Image: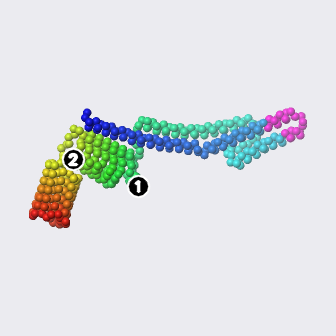
Amino acid sequence: MNTSDSELNLASLADRISQVEAEQNLRRKNIAWLKQYFDELKQEFNNRPELDQIQTMQQEIVQLTAQVAELQQCLNLSSNIMSEDLNEGENLTEIKTIDDAEIVKQFFERVERQQSQGVLIEKEVVIKNVDIDEIEKDEEVDVIAEESENSNAFKNLEFQIERIMWLVNRIYAAEEDYQDIPVSAEEFWCRYEAGERDFTGINLAGVNLSGKSMSYVSFNQANFDNANFENIKLSSVSLENSTLRKANLTGAHLYKIDIIGSHLSGANLSNANLRKARLIGSDLSNANLSSANLLEANLENANLEGVNLQKSIYNSQTIFPKDFVSETGAYLIAPGASLAKADLSGADLSQVNLTGANLSYSNLELTNMQGTDLSQANLSSANLTKANLIESKLIQANLRFANLSEANLSSANLTAANLISTNLIQTALNSANLTAAGLSGANLTNANWCNYARWYNP
């Protein structure tokens, strides 16, 4: 194994370690939040007002029990006095009866005072031929039943909370992937416009964000499966380790985007601009990359099994997986390239080197070739309608019979270029260098010559 392979393996291992750490941090945050939530719920249950009422009732029951015991003691004392002095006559019996009645009266007066102070008594006590033993027994049964009912209610809720916590711990102990409810496009867009930019791990599966423009956003580990991103424009956005299975990215502007380690199997990336994008280690199996721009893109270690690269463009700076052979139909953009009759309409070919390339009869309508070097290139009969050729080099280029209507050649260098019989209707030639250019037979109707640099030889 050579040094470059070792560095690559170390870089891949470092990326994987970072990914695992990020996943663990996300799990820890969720577990901490859930535990805090259930602790608050448990504390709220323990502080519920019903507990205070139960405690008050228990205290009052203890007081009632003490009062009943006091009454029993007094009655027993009266009974002993009666048995010892039974023969003292009717007057003593009357006095005893009065004493007993007074004791009972005092007992009920105490109960009434406690009722006026807010003590809860569910049933009215009617004492008739009072049997002290039975009263004590009934009171004890009521207390036990009430305490049992409240204890059961507490234990049931406590069990439910413990059960939920057990399930949460079991889920994360098994390291199952965290899956939240998908966020709607409306909710996401509100959050984005409010200034939120970190959407790590967000679930936007199936959302429609077609035509939107976003910048400086983190979508790492996000879920975009089956999402519609047609013609979306992303700038300084990270999509590392995200999932975009079967997502629609037709015409998406993904210039210099990081999509490292992501899943794009079955995704539609036709006409997408992936120039300078980093797709290292991504899964692009069965993806549609037809007419996609892969100039300077990095697809190292990517899975390209079954990928469609028809009419896509790449150059010598594009990095493909080791031993990958580009299928027939993809266009190599390079000096001297053979691109006759190629369909490159709307492509971004700015700043590339196409010196001496054969582009005769090619379709370059709306193509961006700003700053491109096309010196000595063959563009005869090519369709360059509305093409952007600002500051491009067309020194000694062959543009005979080419269609340049509404094209922008401002500040272009057309020194010694062949423009014979060329269609230059409404073409912008501001500050263009036309030194020694051949323009005989060219159609210059409504062409813009303002601030031209040098005149031409007819």
Stretch of the chain drawn in magenta: 74-96
Q: Which quadrant would the C terminus be assigned to in this image?
A: bottom left
* Residue ID for mark 1: 194
At label 2, the amino acid type is Tyr
Quick one: 419 or 43, which is closer to the camera? 419
Q: Residue at x 71, y 44 (%)?
A: 124
Residue 278 seen in the current view:
yes
Which of the numbered marks, if any, corresponds to residue 314? 2
Q: Is residue 160 magenta?
A: no
Would you say the magenta stretch is mainly helix, strand or loop? helix
**Is there CB contact under 8 Å for labels 1 and 2?**
no
At label 1, the amino acid type is Ala
Quick one: 88 or 165, which is closer to the camera? 165
Which of the numbered marks, if any, corresponds to residue 65? none
Helix, strand or loop under label 1? loop
Coordinates of residue 156 in the picture (x, y in percent): 55, 38
